[in-house]
Image: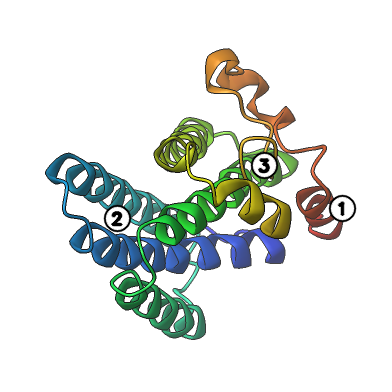
């Protein structure tokens, strides 16, 4: 079955490769941690990312969308570089930038959901919703680990992510049901522009 939505096809390919980059980065992050509980938590997040990649492969295969070789190579290199850097940049930055990354990843899945809806397809609502929520859980976890760091206010000011800054509007304490998940991320510039540009 073909998917007549070029931008959605590209977003699926990019997310598939991006999940491997994240998983590879978390391998290095976990290995750099001394505390067993912290290491186990990051390893669980790594496992979540591999699971997301598997879910995305099912969707790619259903619509006969090939894996992008260029995305695979690019994101593999990014993931490996980040993985290695975790051993030399201290404890704060791996947590901070992981949280910032996860914050942006949240909206990818809700944008996908909305784009599928534009084609009249609702088959993937549950899995896309679950992956988007899981990415938000990751963001919250990473933020909790650094919430008391004196570096956080400075990094938030420079990189625009922290307790008062996010690039998604998901609130885990007041989650929308799946039937209303398409309303997430409409008010965030990057994804609003993507929606308008990505119409089939």
Q: Nearer the viewer, mark 1 or mark 3?
A: 3
> Which residue is rendered at x = 46% and y = 65% of the image?
18
**186 over 25 or under it: above or below:** above
The percent position of residue 138, horizontal first and vertical second, equals: 42, 40
Inter-mark Cα distance, 2 to 3:
24 Å
Q: Which residue is mark 3?
A: 166
**SS under mark 2:** helix
Q: Which residue is mark 1?
A: 196
The percent position of residue 135, horizontal first and vertical second, equals: 47, 41
Q: Is residue 37 toward the left or the right of residue 173 in the image?
A: left
Inter-mark Cα distance, 2 to 1:
30 Å
Q: Which residue is mark 2?
A: 50
Q: Nearer the viewer, residue 4 or 78?
A: 78
Q: Nearer the viewer, mark 2 or mark 1?
A: 2
Q: Nearer the viewer, residue 94 or 128?
A: 94
Q: Is residue 30 toward the left or the right of residue 105 in the image?
A: left
Q: Earlier in the sequence, mark 1 or mark 3?
A: 3
Q: Decide: few, some or many residues near mark 2? Use Cα within 10 Å; few <14, some 14-19, many ≥20.
A: some
- Mark 2 and mark 3 residues within 8 Å of each other at the beta carbon: no
> Which residue is rendered at x = 54% and y = 60% of the image?
12
**SS under mark 1:** helix
Q: Nearer the viewer, residue 123 or 108?
A: 108
In the image, farthest residue toward the front = 150
**SS under mark 3:** loop
Which of the 4 quarters of the picture holds residue 144?
A: top left
């Amino acid at each position: 079955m073909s998917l007549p939505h070029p931008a959605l096809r590209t977003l699926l390919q990019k997310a598939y490769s991006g999940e491997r980059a994240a998983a590879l980065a978390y391998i290095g992050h976990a290995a750099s941690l001394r505390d067993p509980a912290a290491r186990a938590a990051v390893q669980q997040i790594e496992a979540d990312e591999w699971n997301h990649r598997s879910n995305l492969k099912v969707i790619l295969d259903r619509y006969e969308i090939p894996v992008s070789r260029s995305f695979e190579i690019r994101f593999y290199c990014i993931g490996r570089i980040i993985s290695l850097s975790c051993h030399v940049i201290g404890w704060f930055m791996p947590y901070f930038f992981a949280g910032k990354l996860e914050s942006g990843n949240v909206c990818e899945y809700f944008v996908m959901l909305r784009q599928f809806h534009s084609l009249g397809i609702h088959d993937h609502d549950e899995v896309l919703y679950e992956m988007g929520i899981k990415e938000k859980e990751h963001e919250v976890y990473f933020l909790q680990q650094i919430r008391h760091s004196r570096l956080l206010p400075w990094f938030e000011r420079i990189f625009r992510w922290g307790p008062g800054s996010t690039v998604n509007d998901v609130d885990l304490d007041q989650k929308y049901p799946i039937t209303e998940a398409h309303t997430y991320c409409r008010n965030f510039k990057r994804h609003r522009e993507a929606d308008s540009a990505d119409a089939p």
